[in-house]
């Protein structure tokens, strides 16, 4: 496999991790539409919850972050850590460590030069090339956005209890998918294959923790690949600012079928050191 293909696969995997997280995040805001109205005015909950979700979603591209992806296959565990930045309208992954071992100084220098070359390349690309690159990135985000914003019609929720999660009072909700018509779009079909539990901060209505299980096969690349029942996903959100929470950790026990082949992967990703993208990119380019 050449380096370009390998980078493309790594970037696609990272996008998929975020896709899964935002899929599951839909549970928490679907849930606020009904059961919490017992304790709080429904209109206020819907307004605050929707605004919070949209604000967090919109803020995500504004932040650079460090992503560590760990994959377990059989008894072998491997990991890769990258600095993720956004350059001229789309993301870029710069390797920082392999299996928790920092890159050698010469490799680190080479990766910094690749980053600088990529910045120069994107600045010099033709309008059509830029349009295609940004359009591809935005297409992924638009597909994810459709999944997130379809939540009001996707689930039936029950308020289970109230408890403390990570030191904060939280509502605990369970969600089961509603039956949707066969003509429903991709977002509805994906959401219809999941059920889960979510912990919602009572003060600011951000999700603290979400656990999801796949109960029906979920299409991921058309009809060629599906996520199968037995898949379990857990992730937590972390405050980045007083008003913005973004994904902090994600773990998946993933059962996937590709044509006639089935596989089981166990992955864990952490997302840390969120900082404004403009500041991080300036620091990296100055080295």
Image (spheres, rainbow, N blue to C red):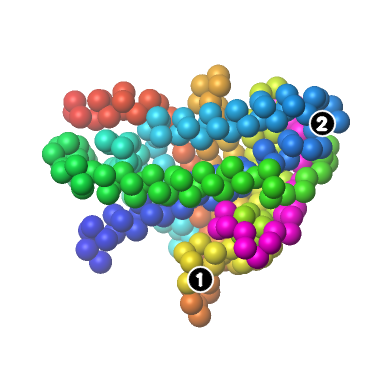
Q: Which residues are magenta?
A: 167-187
Quick check: 275 left or right of 27? left
Quick check: 157 left or right of 100? right
Identified at 31% across, 37% down, the residue is 89
In which quadrant is the C terminus drawn?
top left
Foreground pick, 151 / 128: 128
The residue at which mark 2 appears reads as: 37
Identified at 48% across, 32% down, the residue is 58
Foreground pick, 235 / 61: 61
Residue 17 in the image, given as x and y percentages of width and height? 48, 50
Residue 185 can be seen, yes or no: yes
147 relative to 263, above or below:
above
Provide the secondary structure element on which disc 2 rests: helix
Identified at 74% across, 37% down, the residue is 33
The residue at which mark 1 appears reads as: 223
- In reply to whether residue 123 is colored magenta, the answer given is no
Residue that sits furthest to the front in the current view:
183
- In reply to whether residue 176 is colored magenta, the answer given is yes
């Amino acid at each position: 496999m050449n380096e370009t293909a390998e980078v493309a696969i790594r970037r696609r995997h990272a996008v998929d991790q975020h896709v899964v997280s935002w899929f599951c995040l839909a549970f928490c805001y679907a849930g606020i539409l009904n059961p919490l109205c017992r304790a709080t005015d429904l209109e206020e909950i819907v307004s605050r919850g929707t605004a919070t979700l949209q604000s967090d979603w919109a803020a995500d591209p504004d932040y650079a972050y460090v992503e560590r992806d760990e994959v377990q296959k059989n008894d072998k565990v491997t990991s890769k850590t990258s600095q993720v930045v956004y350059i001229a309208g789309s993301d870029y992954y710069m390797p920082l460590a392999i299996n928790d071992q920092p890159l050698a100084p010469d490799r680190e220098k080479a990766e910094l030069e690749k980053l600088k070359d990529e910045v120069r390349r994107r600045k010099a690309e033709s309008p059509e090339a830029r349009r295609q690159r940004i359009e591809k990135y935005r297409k992924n985000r638009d597909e994810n956005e459709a999944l997130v914003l379809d939540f009001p019609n996707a689930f039936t929720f029950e308020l289970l209890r109230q408890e403390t999660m990570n030191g904060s009072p939280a509502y605990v909700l369970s969600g089961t998918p509603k039956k949707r018509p066969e003509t429903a779009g991709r977002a509805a079909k994906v959401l219809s294959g999941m059920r889960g539990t979510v912990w919602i901060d009572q003060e600011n209505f951000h999700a603290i923790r979400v656990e999801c299980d796949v109960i029906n096969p979920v299409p991921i690349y058309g009809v060629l690949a599906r996520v199968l029942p037995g898949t379990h996903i857990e992730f937590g959100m972390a405050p980045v600012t007083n008003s913005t929470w973004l994904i902090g950790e994600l773990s998946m026990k993933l059962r996937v079928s590709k044509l006639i082949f089935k596989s089981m992967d166990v992955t864990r990703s952490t997302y840390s050191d969120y900082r404004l993208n403009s500041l991080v990119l300036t620091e990296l380019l100055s080295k």
